[in-house]
Amino acid sequence: MVDKYNGFLSRESIKDYSRYVDTVSKYFKGRIRYYVPFNEQNTMVEIPEYCTGVKPKSREESFMLDHHLNLCWAKATQIIHKNDPTAKIGGNICNTCIYPKTCNPADVEAAEKEEHQFGYAYADVFARSEYSPVFLDKYADIDLKKIIKKGDMDIISAAKPDFLSLTYYMSTLASTKEVGDTLLNTNLKNPYTKQTEYGWNIDAYGYKRYLLNFYERYHLPILVLENGLGHTDTVEKNGTIEDDYRIKYLADHIKRMQEAIHLGVKMIGYCTWSAMDLFSTHEGFEKRYGFVYVDSKTLERKKKKSFYWYKKVIETNGADLTNN
C-alpha cells in the first residue's frame, strides 16, 4: 500500500482498509467482541513514518493523513456493525493528563489548548462526528475544502461507536514559556511527582482525572488499552526479576481507576502494557513493560515478580493489590 500509492496519504487506502476490515469481521464473526480499528490514532500523525510508513511533506498532507485515517475508522465502524451486530467498536487515542505549569491564566489556556488539539480533537470525531473548532484552528492556514470531499462528513456522522478507548502512562505540563513534548514528555517535568528512568511523570491521580474528563465530556464507556511502566529490568543471580516499581505503579493506578468508577465512570475493560517485554517505540528492547521478561538475544522468557502479583489482581478482580 505504501509503495503502490503512498499509503494513508492516498484515498485509495480507504477502500483497501475497508476491504481488510470486511474480511476480518466476517471471518471472526461472533468470536471477537471488541474492535479498535487503530491503536493510538492521534500519534500516527505525530510519528507518521514509524506508524504509517509515510512522511507528510506539508501541513496539508498532515491533515490529509488525519482525515483519511478518520474516514477509515468511520468506514470500519459501519462495516463491523453490519457484519457482526453483537460486536462493539470504539476509537482509540493516546493522551496525557495535562496540567498548566503555573497558575498564570496563559498557562491554563495553553494546557486546555493541548488537551483539545492532541486528545479531544480526535475523540470529537469518534463521539461527536465533527472536527472541533480548536482543532480546525490548528490548520487555519489550509484550504480544507480541497481535502474534505463532499460526503466525507456524512461517512463520519454515520459511524456510531460503542465505547471510547484510551491509553495512559503519565501526566505532563503546558507552559507558554517552554515548549514541551506532550507525547514523549521529555522537557517539562512536574516537580511534585516522581519520574521514570525515561523522564515520564508518574501520576496516578492524573489517570483518575483523565478518566473523569473523557467520560464526563463524551458519556461513552471506556476501554483502556494501555497503562504501564517502562523500566530497565535486571535478572538477579537467582534468576528472579524483582520489579516492585512496576507493581507499585500499577497498584496506584488501579486504585485511582477504582475511585473513578465509584464516581460514575463506566469502564468496560482495562489492559496493561504489556503481557511480555517487546520492542519499545523509542528505546528498543532496553525499555521493558512486560510481566514476562524476554531475553532479546535468546528469546528465553522469565516470569517477573509482577507476573504473580497481577495474576492475584485478576483472580480477586482488583480487590487485592498488596505486594507480598
Image (spheres, rainbow, N blue to C red):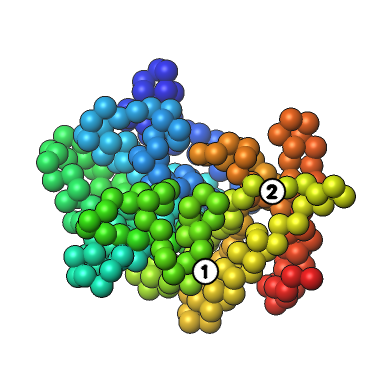
Q: Position of residue 269 (x, y in %)?
A: 58, 63
The residue positioned 36% from the left and 41% from the top of the image is 46
Q: Residue at x 40, y 44 (%)?
A: 43
Which numbered disc, 2 or 1, marks the residue that appears first in the sequence?
A: 1
Side (left or right) of 30 relative to 300: left
Q: Residue 293: x, y in percent?
A: 74, 45
Q: Toward the viewer: 113 or 135?
A: 113
Q: Do labels 2 and 1 touch, CB within 8 Å?
A: no
Choose between 284 and 79: the one closer to the eye. 284
Mark 2 lies on residue: 233
Residue 182 as seen in the image, left or right of residue 225: left
Residue 215 visible, this angle: no
What amino acid type is highlighted by mark number 1?
Ala
In this view, the mark in front (2 or 1): 2
User: Which residue is at 51% across, 63% downward?
Assistant: 194
The CA distance from mark 2 to mark 1 is 21 Å
Position of the C terminus by quadrant:
bottom right
Crowd class of label 2 (few under 14; some 14 to 19; many from 20; radius 10 Å): some
Residue 247 vs residue 141: left or right? Answer: right
- Residue 24 image position (x, y, % from top left): 57, 39
Amino acid type of the residue that numbered disc 2 sits on in the rendered structure: Asp
- Picture disc at residue 86: none
Pick whichever, 242 or 271, lies toward us.
242
- Residue 285 in view (yes/no): yes
